[in-house]
């Protein structure tokens, strides 16, 4: 029996199968080209800043504490001063979302909430939040000016630029 005997006309059209095979072959060819040509992977913002010796303008170590009423208290880890309080229903869902993701990662690794997070404004204008417990860094500028501003305000009124 030939291969044609197993192909029925009510199955996928032959042109669709040929296009799918072409996409798969293109993906393999692209991957092989990158490997053979030794094209380096894109550098992370952290590595780029280190290579270019970009210095921080200011930074602050912060703790994010849940209150019984559903509020989140943001506390300066060095001084214990309250930097901000996010009450339930306030339009600061971005901070809650970012912190929820970081807290989940800590929980999965069996780490507690004692280690603070470092919020840093860099000389190149970028703003990053680094989990000092896991080493994970989030580039906050990538989420737009409004979301960036919610975190930049935690550095103090004169550091929000």
Image (cartoon, grey):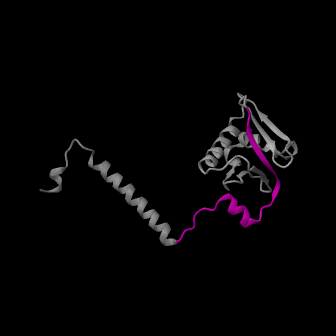
Q: In the figure, 35 relative to 106: above or below?
A: below
Residue ID at (15%, 51%): 5
Q: In the figure, 25 relative to 128: above or below?
A: below
Q: In the figure, 29 relative to 134: above or below?
A: below
Residue ID at (51%, 71%): 37
Asked where in the image residue 40 lies, by quadrant, the reply is: bottom right
- 43 left or right, relative to 51: left
Residue ID at (27%, 49%): 14
The reply to whether the magenta stretch includes residue 45 is yes
Q: Which residues are magenta?
A: 38-67
How many circles with numbers are drawn on the protein? 0
Image quarter (top left, top right, bottom left or bottom right) of the N terminus: bottom left
Q: Position of residue 87 (x, y in %)?
A: 75, 30
Asked where in the image residue 157 lies, by quadrant, the reply is: top right
Asked where in the image residue 104 lies, by quadrant, the reply is: top right
Q: Position of residue 142 (x, y in %)?
A: 67, 48
Residue ID at (71%, 52%): 130
Q: Position of residue 83 (x, y in %)?
A: 83, 40
- 109 left or right, relative to 153: left
Q: Nearer the viewer, residue 131 or 2?
A: 131
Q: Nearer the viewer, residue 71 or 58?
A: 71
The reply to whether the magenta stretch includes residue 123 is no
Q: In the figure, 16 relative to 2: above or below?
A: above
- 50 left or right, relative to 100: right
Q: Nearer the viewer, residue 5 or 101?
A: 101
Q: Position of residue 113 (x, y in %)?
A: 71, 46
């Amino acid at each position: 029996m030939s291969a044609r005997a197993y192909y029925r006309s009510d199955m996928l059209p032959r042109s669709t199968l040929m296009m799918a095979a072409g996409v798969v072959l293109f993906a393999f060819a692209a991957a092989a080209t990158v490997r053979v040509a030794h094209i380096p992977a894109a550098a992370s913002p952290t590595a780029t800043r280190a290579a270019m010796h970009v210095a921080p303008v200011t930074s602050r170590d912060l703790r994010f504490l849940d209150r019984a009423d559903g509020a989140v208290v943001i506390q300066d880890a060095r001084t214990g001063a309250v930097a901000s309080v996010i009450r339930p229903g306030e339009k600061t869902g971005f901070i809650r979302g970012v912190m929820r993701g970081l807290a989940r990662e800590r929980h999965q690794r069996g780490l507690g909430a004692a280690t603070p997070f470092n919020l840093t404004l860099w000389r190149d204008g970028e703003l990053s939040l680094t989990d000092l417990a896991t080493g994970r860094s989030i580039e906050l500028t990538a989420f737009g000016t409004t979301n960036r501003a919610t975190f930049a305000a935690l550095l103090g009124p004169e550091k929000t630029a």
